[in-house]
Amino acid sequence: RVSRKVTAPERVQAGVGKPFTLTCAFSKDRGDAVRQVTWLDVNNQTLLSYQPGNKDSVSGQQHVELTPSSKDTSSVTIQRVSFRDEGCYTCIFDTVQAHAKQGRTCLTVTASVIADSNKTAVSGKKASLSCSYGLPEKVQQVSWRYASAPGGLSSDVASYAKRSDPMIEPAYQGRVWLSASLSDSTLTIQPVAIQDEGCYTCLYNTHADGPKSSTVCLSTYALPKPQVSYKSTSAGVIEANCSAVSRPPVEMVWNVEQDNRTVGPPVTTLLPQDDGTTLVISTLTVRSGLLKDVSVKCLVHHKGLEAPIAVSMNTKIGTALAILISVTTVAALLVLALCFCLWKCFLRKEGV
């Protein structure tokens, strides 16, 4: 003889937004049969009921369905778990030979914090960092903390709690904003400063599940504005300098139109600046005769640029301008000479 009893897991967990199956098993006497199975929800209302072997007898709430299971086992699936589904469920087996037997299983709904992937922002522009948590009903407060490096010491940036306005720490007021939401939290920084580079942790304080957090890291770029200058250093030799301040440092390549009249390879110097940027200077020494024939360009590559910036020394323009000035000067002298001759001729006619 088998003792009639219902077995079910005491506690189970389900992720919010996902399907989940609740199961109970019934041990009955030989020759006995189950007439009806009823599931009660967290409010002791009928979740689903049916008569085994009779598909037409199934009735229940819209968000659940009967799941095929082995003999003497009953399974129902919640199609999309939400906060309202958290609580204890009762499964009741009504048999032919005995009173109804029941089991109980309690469901805890869980969620994880989902953060943006790491982001990059240009200094002076806007950056938005976002996190989401699928159970805002459990959240008491969401806060953001900043650390200059992963795992480093962190400090408060902003927070938002129920029935209050977002709170921004004094050091960030005027350029940092926080959305008033306990589910989808967005931290906006505008304008972004180079010093904002680091990792930001969004922390959801829940009343039942403890703190839940995730981290997104922000990289800041300062775009370059390259300049080219040149000067004569000795007879027949010119030193060209290409410079740019940026973050991270740029890479510079000289283009001398495939000419080989350079005096050695370019020399690059990196000078860190107090604001976190780096001044890069690339020096190229060329023979002065080269500048009369070709255009010398500095190509500047940077992670924040879609394409490199090309800066020319404009030596051809300088040569053309010098020629233009020379021609203009000669023409002016010829005009003056012509005017002088006409004036002399006029004086001679008056003297006759």
Image: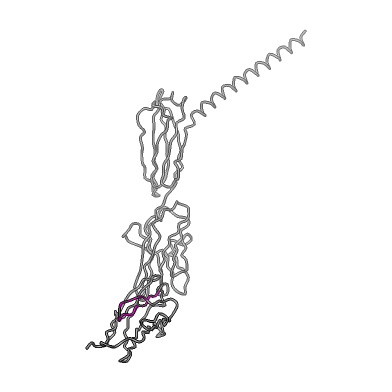
Q: How many marks?
A: 0
Q: Position of residue 77 (x, y in %)?
A: 38, 75
The residue that appears at 39% across and 41% down in the rendered structure is 251
Determine if the magenta segment contains residue 97.
no
- The picture quadrant where one finds residue 57 is bottom left
Determine if the magenta segment contains residue 75.
yes
- Which residue range is magenta in the image? 67-78
Compared across the picture, whether 124 is left or right of 34 comes to right
> Is residue 190 something that shows in the picture?
yes
In depth, the one of 172 and 318 nearer the eye is 318
In depth, the one of 351 and 316 nearer the eye is 316
Q: Residue furthest top?
A: 352
> Is residue 139 something that shows in the picture?
no
Q: Position of residue 194 (x, y in %)?
A: 41, 52
* Colour style of the rendered protein structure: one colour
Q: Is residue 113 above or below residue 252?
A: below
In depth, the one of 232 and 318 nearer the eye is 318
Q: Residue furthest left?
A: 1
Compared across the picture, whether 212 is left or right of 128 comes to left
- The picture quadrant where one finds residue 102 is bottom left
In depth, the one of 155 and 70 nearer the eye is 70
Q: Is residue 7 above or below residue 298?
A: below
Quadrant of the frame with the N terminus: bottom left
Q: Position of residue 109 (x, y in %)?
A: 36, 74
Q: Position of residue 207 (x, y in %)?
A: 37, 76
Quadrant of the frame with the C terminus: top right
Compared across the picture, whether 40 is left or right of 295 comes to left
